[in-house]
């Protein structure tokens, strides 16, 4: 069934009202960052036999680089310059590390969940908090 014009107009209004295009762009950047995070974490853990928490942290760093560049140029299309945006992103990134590694560590110690499941949970929860901090502070216009 083809959507008729009134429905399309309402759909466009919803996209505009909630800035869903930006949320979708953030999702694309997030998937790229999360994929890099997971690949690096698994490679460091399985190939280099590094401690699980340090393996996850190394993956997080790779994801953070992709996240900053993607957020700056694609998601928020910042025009403020890196001098303003980068320090703010770093603070958001540090808070994200605390959330990511802290959650990972709690799940690993308290619940003895498998490494892969811990990485997945940490990757799933961290971006929500980071999006809100990036949108309303780091890249706020």
Image: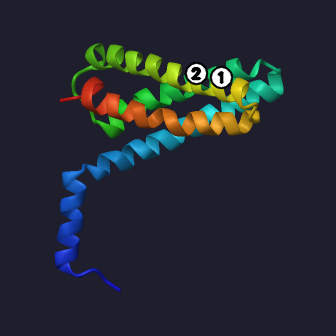
Q: Residues within 10 Å of mark 1 (few under 14, many from 20)?
A: some
The answer to whether 15 is drawn above or below residue 122 in the figure is below
**Which residue is drawn at the image coordinates 20% and 54% (left, top)?**
16
Residue that carries the numbered disc 1 in the rendered image = 105
Residue 55 percent across, percent down from the top left = 70, 22
Label annotation for residue 40: none
The quarter of the picture where the N terminus appears is bottom left
Closer to the camera in the image, 121 or 60: 121
**Left-right relation of 22 to 31:** left
**Which residue is drawn at the image coordinates 31% and 18% (left, top)?**
82
The answer to whether 24 is drawn above or below residue 109 in the figure is below
Residue 29 percent across, percent down from the top left = 45, 40
The quarter of the picture where the C terminus appears is top left
| Secondary element at tag 2 | helix
Task: Examine the image and state in which quarter residue 71 appears.
Answer: top left
Check contact, mark 1 vs mark 2: CB within 8 A.
yes
Residue 104 percent across, percent down from the top left = 63, 27
Q: CA distance from mark 1 to mark 2?
A: 5 Å
| Secondary element at tag 1 | helix
Residue that carries the numbered disc 2 in the rendered image = 102
Numbered circles on residues, count: 2
**Which residue is drawn at the image coordinates 76% and 31% (left, top)?**
112
Closer to the camera in the image, 62 or 18: 18
Closer to the camera in the image, 122 or 37: 122
Q: Residues within 10 Å of mark 2 (few under 14, many from 20)?
A: some
Closer to the camera in the image, 114 or 44: 114
Q: Residue furthest bottom?
A: 1
Q: How is the image coloured?
A: rainbow
Residue 88 percent across, percent down from the top left = 33, 17
């Amino acid at each position: 069934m083809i959507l008729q014009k009134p429905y399309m107009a309402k759909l466009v209004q919803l996209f505009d009202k909630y800035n869903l295009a930006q949320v979708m762009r953030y999702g694309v950047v997030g998937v790229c960052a999360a994929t890099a995070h997971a690949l690096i974490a698994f490679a460091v853990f399985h190939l280099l036999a590094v401690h699980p928490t340090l393996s996850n942290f190394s993956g997080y760093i790779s994801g953070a680089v992709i996240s900053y560049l993607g957020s700056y140029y694609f998601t928020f299309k910042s025009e403020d310059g890196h001098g303003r945006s980068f320090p703010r992103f770093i603070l958001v990134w540090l808070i994200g590390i605390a959330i990511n590694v802290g959650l990972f560590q709690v799940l690993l110690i308290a619940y003895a969940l498998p490494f892969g499941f811990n990485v997945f949970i940490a990757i799933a929860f961290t971006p929500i908090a980071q999006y809100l901090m990036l949108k309303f502070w780091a890249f706020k216009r």
